[in-house]
Amino acid sequence: MVHYADGQPTGELTLRTLAMPSDANAAGDIFGGWVMAQMDLACGIRAAERAKGRVVTAAVKEMSFAKPMKIGDTLCVYTHVNRVGRTSMTLKVEAWAQRYLTDLMERVTDADFIMVALDSEGRPKVVPEEAGGE
């Protein structure tokens, strides 16, 4: 059973991956850019499902790292669609570290990602209504 040290994650578990030595600096800390890239991948998955098509990242609002990730930790990325506009979506994204060989989960960082739905020509398109309403 997993023990959450910093409350409960918000949203759905969208991506899990292992932090490897190639993702770290000489001190064994995982690069923040690697964590952010995994968060962007998770956002792309969730937003594409919601938009029923292609999406791109338009912006990331304020990200700060509360705790480091280390080699061997499992990065768990949770996403939640907070808002749907005409062509864009705002998703709350949280990155949690399951510490190597333990049941401890700690929040590493979180941010709001703005995603834009695109048509086949790469132009913004209307995000379709969800079945049963928002």
Image (cartoon, rainbow, N blue to C red):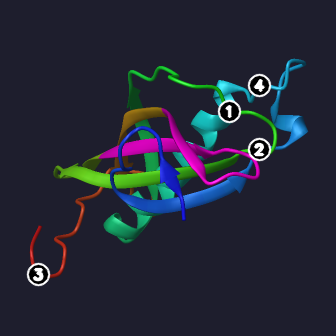
Against 102, residue 52 (above or below) is below
Measured in 3D between alpha carbons, the distance from the residue under mark 3 to the one under mark 2, in whole angstroms, is 39 Å
Which disc number belongs to residue 19? 2
Q: Is residue 72 left or right of residue 39?
A: right
Question: Main SS of the magenta segment?
Answer: strand
Residue at the spot x=34%, y=56% of the render? Answer: 11
Is residue 87 among what the camera can see?
Answer: no
Total numbered labels: 4
Residue type at tag 4: Asp
94 is within the stretch colored magenta = yes
Q: Which residue is mark 4?
A: 29
Q: Which residue is mark 3?
A: 132
| Circle nearer the N terminus (4, 1) | 4
Q: Please state which of the two labelled residues, at mark 4 or mark 3, is closer to the viewer.
A: 4
Q: Is residue 99 left or right of residue 104?
A: right
Residue at the spot x=16%, y=71% of the render? Answer: 129
